[in-house]
């Protein structure tokens, strides 16, 4: 099949004549003389292989093919006219797509609030949200499959080869079965908590936090009794409700209210306290799109002074 090469100029000429139904008025509207317009319309009809206009010495009328074509041509010309502004908006980061990965803890409170605020500020930027553990996020960033990620880590940690901005910090609390004797205390002692079986995430998904929790036990001269591992914080809390053990979780997980589970802040013991954690926005410095640049600025503003 032969490929048609019809220029936008020819569609403008067709639309002008279809709306004016007069060669002289259409030519004047297009700032050209009548003979070139007549030749252009004839050339368009020849290229399409159909008549678009019925002509007499006194009148010009659209054929059925011309009438069917006119709305589509108007739509084409409208979209073409909008292209320069779309290009400028995309270059300025006012529209486009932002692929954002996040850990589950961000989804409890921070992410819903940020998504609402960012969409109000940049309504034409489409946010594509992908929940993923930290190790998966690093792989997605390396392959260019996400633009940025929200990762959980121990204070001060920086992902190798990635730019970052800290967006939140919070202490760990302990999730306990509601029926456990330690749950009756507002601030159970750290030594008693360390003697209990532990439900924890695998080291590969949050290595710095896994190591920080284990260091808490080792500093007290204890080896953690790992009863079960699970990837998602919600699953970990569900396993706590089943009585498999206690779990150290970021304070934001308190938003996940599971029947049979209570959250407690442990009482420090001999200078030892529960570890803290941070959430950072991470991205590749060599792959910052205009839309991502806006989100980085937005995130730093939302997080406040660091």
Image (cartoon, grey):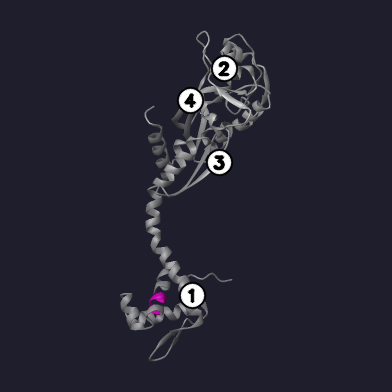
Q: Label 2 belongs to which residue?
A: 185
Front disc: 4 or 2: 2
- Could you say which quadrant of the image residue 207 lies in? top right
For marks 3 and 4 on the same chain, the one whose residue lies earlier in the sequence: 3
Q: Indicate whether 138 appears above or below 26.
A: above
Q: Which residue is drawn at 46% across and 72% down?
A: 71
* Mark-to-mark CA distance, 3 and 1: 42 Å
- The answer to whether marks 3 and 1 mark residues whose Cβ atoms lie closer than 8 Å is no
Q: Label 1 belongs to which residue?
A: 69
Q: Which residue lies furthest to the bottom in this view?
A: 57
The disc at residue 170 is: 4
User: Dot 3: few (<14), some (14–19), or many (≥20) neighbours within 10 Å?
Assistant: some
Q: Which of 165 and 244 is in front in this view?
A: 244
The disc at residue 130 is: 3
On the rendered structure, is 30 left or right of 66? left
* 277 in the magenta segment: no
Front disc: 1 or 2: 2
Please provide percent x and percent y for residue 281.
47, 33
**Residues drawn in magenta:** 13-17
For marks 4 and 1 on the same chain, the one whose residue lies earlier in the sequence: 1
Q: Which residue is drawn at 53% across and 22% down?
A: 172
């Amino acid at each position: 099949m032969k490929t048609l090469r019809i220029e936008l100029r020819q569609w403008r000429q067709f639309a002008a004549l279809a709306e004016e139904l007069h060669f002289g008025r259409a030519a004047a509207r297009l700032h050209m003389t009548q003979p070139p317009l007549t030749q252009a319309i004839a050339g368009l009809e020849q290229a399409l292989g159909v008549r678009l206009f019925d002509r007499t010495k006194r009148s010009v009328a659209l054929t059925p093919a011309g009438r069917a074509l006119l709305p589509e041509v108007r739509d084409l010309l409208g979209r073409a006219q909008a292209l320069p502004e779309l290009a400028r908006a995309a270059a300025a980061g006012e529209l486009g797509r932002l692929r954002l990965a996040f850990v589950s803890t961000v989804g409890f409170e921070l992410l819903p609030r940020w998504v609402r605020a960012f969409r109000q500020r940049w309504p034409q930027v489409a946010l594509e949200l992908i929940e993923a553990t930290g190790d998966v996020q690093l792989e997605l960033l390396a392959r260019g499959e996400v633009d940025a990620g929200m990762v959980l880590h121990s204070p001060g940690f920086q992902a190798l080869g990635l730019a970052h901005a800290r967006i939140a910090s919070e202490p760990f609390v302990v999730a306990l079965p509601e029926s456990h004797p330690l749950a009756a205390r507002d601030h159970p002692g750290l030594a008693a908590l360390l003697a209990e079986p532990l439900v924890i995430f695998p080291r590969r998904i949050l290595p710095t936090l896994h190591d920080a929790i284990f260091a808490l036990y080792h500093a007290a001269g204890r080896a953690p009794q790992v009863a079960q591992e699970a990837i998602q914080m919600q699953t970990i809390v569900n396993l706590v409700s089943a009585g498999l053990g206690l779990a150290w979780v970021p304070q934001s997980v308190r938003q996940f209210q599971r029947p049979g589970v209570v959250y407690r802040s442990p009482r420090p013991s001999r200078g030892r306290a529960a570890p803290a954690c941070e959430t950072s926005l991470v991205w590749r410095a060599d792959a910052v799109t205009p839309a991502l640049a806006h989100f980085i600025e937005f995130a730093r503003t939302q997080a406040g002074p660091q």
